[in-house]
Each structure stands twice: as structure tokens, then as C-alpha cells.
Image (cartoon, helix red, strand yellow):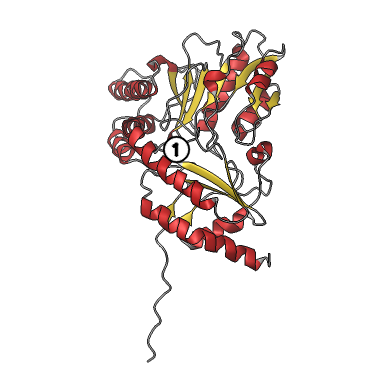
Amino acid sequence: MSPTADPPSVPPAVDLDAASSEPLHPAARDALLSALDRGYADPRRLHRAGRSARLLLDNARAVVAENLGVRPDEVSFTGSGTEAVHRGMLGLVRGHRAGSGRVVHPAVEHAAVRHAAAWGGGSREVPVDRLGRVDVPALRVAAATADVSAVAVQTANHEVGTVQPLAELDLPHDVPLFTDACASMGRLPIPPGWDAAAGSAHKWGGPAGVGVLLVRKGARWRNPFPGDDRVDERVAGFENVPAALAAAASLQAVVAERDDTARRQSALVARIREEVARIPDVEVVGDPDRRLPHLVTFSCLYLDGEALVHALEREGFGVASGSACAATTLEPSAVLTAMGTLTHGNVRVSLTRGTTEADVDRLLGVLPGVVARLRAELQL
């Protein structure tokens, strides 16, 4: 009997797509499991189970508020970050003195913002520079026109990590500001000046299916969708109380660790940026300094991003490519197009809280060979 050949070795999997979804934080898992039996009831009801659920929901709201530096009554839980974006931004449009109007936003906003603005009354895009930073003077001019009801500027870009200069906007006093903070909430403090903001729990290690909607006290916000008789007029339907508590617990944990995590991840990303830039015909995109600490994107001339993703997966790395909003699209990234950078052959690497220096060493060890091999297959 001939000896059986050893199976080919499979590299250990390394998740480098935290920008899509961070692995569930242990604090979220513990809170979720402990709340499943106590938070199942309708928190609006007056019986014992309802009161128990209400206490858990109020506690989740208070924890989120404390860790984001806002008031508890400014916090609502939605069914997703996308829902929080839609409700937050469109509520400002409806609450404006005109009751409708265009939304001014940078050309690199998430698709959730761009689509909602088009649906709600139209939009006016403002250009960005090659690093992805909005043209602030152009934004101010656009915001001052009569048919504008709101301005939407993301806190940090979801594809390239560039942090937007919210503190420098200086908008007209009667034009409210919405900020999509889904990519940065928990990782960076929310800059001041917003009237409504949105976050997504699974981006910081909470459970999927929980969005955070912040509406500043005194903001002119009106529900843009059909309402119901819930206590919180900013949401519709029955909150997922155990998931909201898990989102709050994980947010508290990541904020407590934020400074140390950011220092460690920022140093690793700086190393990736430096080493990747040495590969011929590769462009590292996004602001090198004012950026999310855990994220870096680069584009490889002549190559297809999906081919790079599959090749790196065979080496044991899970990364993202193309539009961060739709992995199956064949269209070039709207963000990279607006920035004027290479749009194909792009890879987004985003570190999880568990990513180690050894993981980065291994990625940088295989990446030049992967790029060279794919180019050789194209006979370039």
C-alpha cells in the first residue's frame, strides 16, 4: 500500500477586514448572553418583564451616551448603521425651515448618504482633493444656497481612512450638519458641530443589526418616515434590547482601550504604508496623517482588485477591494474616482483589535510576490 501524501498546508486565516465588520468583542458576547433572558420583552410595557427590558435599554443608552460624550436622551438604537444614516440625515432635511431641499456632501460619502440624499430631495456634491479631504471653501459656498436643507460630511472615510475637517467647516448657522460616523465611532472621538450623527455597532465589535442614531438636543429634526406609538419617536418598531446592551458594553470596552489600540494599530498601518509603497507601480491612497488608525488602502497598476483579494485569501489573508459598499460590483470605487487615484487593483487592509505584528510581517512578506505573480500571469 502506497503511503498517503500529506495534505497541502493551509496558512492560518488572518482577518484584515475590520472596516467591514470587527469580530465580536468578548464584552459584547457576555452582555448579549446575559441579556437574552432578561431583555426579551417590550420595554414599553408596564409589567415586570417589560420594566426589566426598559431598565436594560435605558442602561445601554446611558453607557453609549457616556462613552460618546452626549446626553442619554440624544441616543437612539436603530436596526443598522444604514438606517441610522437615513433617519439622521433625512430627519434634518425634513426639520429644516423649508421642510425639503438638497443635501450638500463631499463626493466621497458612503452610498447610504448619497442614495438617501437623492431620494430625499436631491444632492449637490462637493469635490475632494487627492487625499480625500473635502474642499471646505466649496462646501461653504454650496451650503449657502437657498435650496439646501442640510450638509452631510462623514467623520472619516470608510474606504481610505481620511479624517474630514469637521471642526473647520464653519457652515451657515441655519444649515444643520449630519455626520456619518460609522467608520470611526468607538475608534475616534466624534468632532463637535454636528446636529445628527450615525454609528454602526458591528464596526467596533458589537453585534450586527444595531445602529446608533444621535440627534443633538434642540436640533430641528423631524421623523422623515411613517411613525408609530413608540416612546422614542426617532425609531420605529421594537428595539433589540439584548443587542443594544451588547453594543453598549463593547463600545465601553473599546473606548477604554482606544488610545493604546490606536497607537499600536497606527504604527502597524504606517509600516504597511511604507513597505507597500516600495512595490513598483503601487499607489497608497488616503491621508497619511489625518486618518483612521487601523485602515490603509493601496492600488496596484495593471491588476484587478478581485484577483488580488482571491490571491491573498489563498495565502491566508481576508482583505477587501473595490467599493466598500458592494463587494460584487464591477464598477470602480466612487471614492477613488472622486479622489483621482487609481481605481482598479485596489486593496483595503483594516486591522482588527487582535491583529499582531507577526500578522503584518507575514502579509508584507507575501504581498510583493503575489503582485509580481499576478502581473506575470498577465504577461506584463
**Vertical position of residue 88 compared to residue 161: above or below:** above
Res 227 seen here: no
Q: Which of 206 and 352 lies nearest the eye of the viewer? A: 352
Please identify the quadrant where the C terminus is shown. bottom right
Relative to 81, 122 lies left or right: right
Q: Which of 330 and 228 lies nearest the eye of the viewer? A: 330
Report the residue marked by disc 1: 293
Residue 353 horizontal/vertical position (percent): 37, 43
Please identify the quadrant where the N terminus is shown. bottom left
**Vertical position of residue 162 compared to residue 371: above or below:** above
Q: Outermost residue toward the bottom?
A: 1
- What element does badge 1 sit on? loop
Q: Residues within 10 Å of mark 1 (few under 14, many from 20)?
A: many
Residue 101 horizontal/vertical position (percent): 69, 16
Residue 262 horizontal/vertical position (percent): 39, 37
Q: Quadrant of residue 25?
A: top left
Amino acid found under the numbered disc labelled 1? Pro
Q: Quadrant of residue 138?
A: top right
Q: Which of 125 and 231 lies nearest the eye of the viewer? A: 125
Q: In which quarter of the image is residue 118?
A: top right
Res 130 seen here: yes
